[in-house]
Image: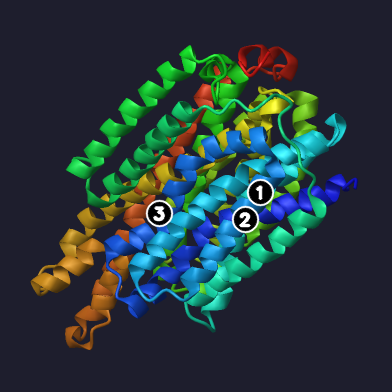
Amino acid sequence: MRRSPSAVLAACCLTVVLVMASVAGVNLALKDLALDLGASSAQLTWVADAYTVALAALVLPFGAIGDDFGRRRALIAGTAIFGLTAFVATFAGSVGLVIACRAVMGIGAALAMPPTLSTITAVFPADRRDRAVGVWAGFASVGAVLGLLLSGSLLEAFSWRSTFLALAAMALVAVVAIVLLVPDTRGAEDPAVDLGGAALSAIGIGALVFGLIEGADRGWDHWLSIGAFVLAAIALSSWVLQALRRERPMLDLRLFALRGFSSGFTTLVIQFLGTFGFFYVGLQYLQLVLGYGPLRSALGFLPMAAVVMPLSSLSPRLAARWGNKPWMAAGLVSMAVGFVLAARLGADSPYWQFLIALLIFSGGLALSATPSTNSIVSALPPAKQGVASAVNDVTREFGAALGIALLGSLFSSAYADRAAGLVAGLPPEAATHVKDSAAAGLEVAADPRLGAHGPALAEGVREAFVHGMSHSFLAGAIVVGVGLAFVLIVTPHRSVPVEKSAELAVVGD
């Protein structure tokens, strides 16, 4: 039976939203989960990050599996694993089980995510493919916002368990849609499983993301962080050597010699570093400084979707007319401006000032995401579109982890430095809480035993927060600026046709 390409696109985008929503949406549920299960701060970190580590580590080898053995099968299996595990998490009685479920959900997401883009590129004709990729990129970008909105809405009336139950229900709908609407596609060649490359890439990328997360939490000189980075360096170096010797590697790393491929990869990392760093700090700004609840905080980010979706659909036409490079560069410029405007916000700034920064930042993400995605997709032949999709996904997850780790650690450090001047006269335990986090500081300030000093402490905590946010967002602007320089120097004005770039892809040529 012939499926409509538009119906295939809808089913695949539903899965994309499901995967990306689970990255961000859980953050709003952490406070409720901690109160219910008695989770520590370290455990809460891993409730959020176990999913990201598993997804980032496995998405590349799982993309190759879909290419070799059938993308529809991988899509159904991954979405089903995700949904069933989310359902189990709904009834978890310990935080350890929640963390384990989040990790298995990440495994399912790693299996499901690559076939979405590779299936789209396989079923759409060439003259409609770029626009379809633009729609996919738009949903990949706003999926996190939709996840926040879903979690915020549920948490207004229900417990944290409702967020996992909702994800399970969405996964069930997605599986039905895939079964009914998505055809099976795969690479034209006989399977050539690269077990060594799969293992080394999974260990290397997983250890790198783990090290970034632990470094931000425990300190960059902690033995666990250093050990993870050493393991990542060994595994990734071994993967490079193994891939260069193998006739048909999982991913031919010589593709990074293609300027379009390498610039698309780098730009996507920068985009999602900025996006999830902005989410991480900006969401706390709405909750702790402006005093918004979970739903109102999620609604505060909703205008991002109103900008990203239409611009993501438009950007393929712009890139087709003027090339990828101008729009990748323009998007990064807009993201940097959004960061600078957000860095200028104060403790008494109204929401509309935050909104302006958010809209400009979002416009930049929308302009640059699709051309960057197309730069990677066009560098690989049709037989390896699952790997192309997986490379896109790795960049997003790696960028998200890096953004939270880098901008989050800079924010925390700057906040702690400023908050240290607020704790004179406080009991030692209360002083530690104030310096640890703004949320804890506001709880201390609300203690009636502080009397008239409470409101002054609360105001000081908010000022310390915006001080940390300013440092974090200015650093984000600098990182985006470095990415902009790379784009201007390296990116070709026009993409290399896939027929030529495929000469470098040693997959049965």
Q: Amino acid at mark 3?
A: Ala
Q: Amino acid at mark 1?
A: Leu
In the image, residue 70 lies at what x, y percent?
69, 39
The residue positioned 32% from the left and 54% from the top of the image is: 467
Which residue is label 3 attached to? 50
The residue positioned 34% from the left and 64% from the top of the image is: 44
In the image, residue 120 lies at what x, y percent?
76, 40
Position of residue 282 relative to residue 67, above or below, is: below
The residue positioned 58% from the left and 75% from the top of the image is: 153
The residue positioned 53% from the left and 35% from the top of the image is: 61
Residue at disc 3, secondary structure:
helix
Comparing 301 with 15, the one in front is 15
Residue 125 picture quarter: top right
Residue at disc 2, secondary structure:
helix
* CB atoms of marks 1 and 2 within 8 Å: yes
Which of the two discs, 1 and 3, labels the residue nearer the N terminus?
A: 3
In the image, residue 251 lies at what x, y percent?
55, 24
Q: CA distance from mark 1 to mark 2?
A: 6 Å
Q: How many marks?
A: 3
Position of residue 359 relative to residue 370, above or below, is: below
- 310 left or right of 465 in image: right
The reply to whether residue 345 is visible in this rendering is no
Q: Amino acid at mark 2?
A: Thr
Mark 3 Cα shell of 10 Å, populated few (<14), some (14-19), many (≥20): many
Picture disc at residue 79: 2
Which residue is label 1 attached to? 75
The reply to whether residue 188 is visible in this rendering is yes
